[in-house]
Image (cartoon, rainbow, N blue to C red):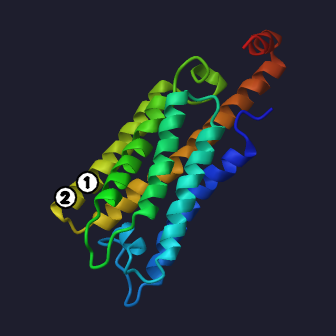
Amino acid sequence: MRVVPRWALLSAALAPVLLIGGWTLGAAHQPGGFDQVTGTISALAARDAADRWIMTLALLGLGLCHCVTAAGLRPLRPAGRLVLALGGVATVAVAAFPLPSGRGSSTPHGLAAAVAFGALALWPALAAGGRRTSGRATGVTTAAGTVCAALLLALVGWFVLELVAGGPRVGLSERVAAGAQALCPLLVAVALDRGRSRHAERAAGDPAARSRCDGQ
C-alpha cells in the first residue's frame, strides 16, 4: 500500500506546472510585453489584464491542488496538512478577488495573498515530525520541516521587502517565493513515498525490521 496516494502525487506535481505555466503564458498574452522581473503575478489576473482568465484559472487550479495534496499527505501531522489546505483556499481567494483596473489595490486580495504566502511557508514545520513521521519510515523529519519553512519564510520576506520598498525585483522575488512554495508539497510527497519504500525494502530483508514494521 502506497503511503502517498497516486492522486496526491499527481496534484502535487501539477501545482508548480499550473503556476509557472500560468504566469509564463499570461505574460506572453500581454500586449506590448510584460516584464516578469518587475510585474507581479497578480497583475496578470487583474481586471484590466489581457486574457486574465489564464492566470485566474492557474491560481484556482493551484489552490485546489494544494487542498487535494493536503488530503493525501496522511502520514504528516494534521495541523500541517490543515495549514497547507488553508494556503490552498487562500490561493483560490486570491483568484476570486482580483486587483482592480488601473493598478489599484484591493484589501480582500491583499489579505488573501498574505494568508496564502504565510500558510504555504509555515506548513512544513507544522506537518513534519511526530510519531508517524519521525525516523526512517517516512524520510521527513522535524529538522527538515523546520529548515524548509525557514527557507520559504526567507523568500517570502524578500518579496515583502521588495513590495514595501517598491523595489525593481518585486515580480522576480514573488515568483521565486511562490514557485518554491508550489514545489514544496511535491518534494515532501516524494520524500514520504521514498522513505516508506526504503523502510519496506529493509524490512523485507531483515526479519527483525519486518517485525518492527508490522508492529507499527
- Is residue 74 found left or right of 41 in the rendered image? right
Mark 2 surroundings: few (<14), some (14-19) or many (≥20) residues within 10 A: few
Residue farthest left in this picture:
165
- Is residue 158 found left or right of 3 in the rendered image? left
Vertical placement of residue 45 versus 211, above or below: below
Element on which disc 2 rests: helix
Residue at position x 76%, y 22% from top?
202
Identify the disc placed on residue 164.
Answer: 2
The answer to which image quadrant residue 109 occupies is bottom left
Measure how far apart labels 2 and 1 are at the Cα level: 6 Å
Q: Quadrant of the N terminus?
A: top right
Q: Are marks 2 and 1 in contact (CB under 8 Å)?
A: yes
Residue at position x 74%, y 45% from top?
6
Amino acid tagged 2? Val
Q: Quadrant of the C terminus?
A: top right
Residue 27 % position (x, y)? 44, 78
Residue 141 % position (x, y)? 52, 26
Amino acid tagged 1? Val
Residue farthest bottom in this picture:
32
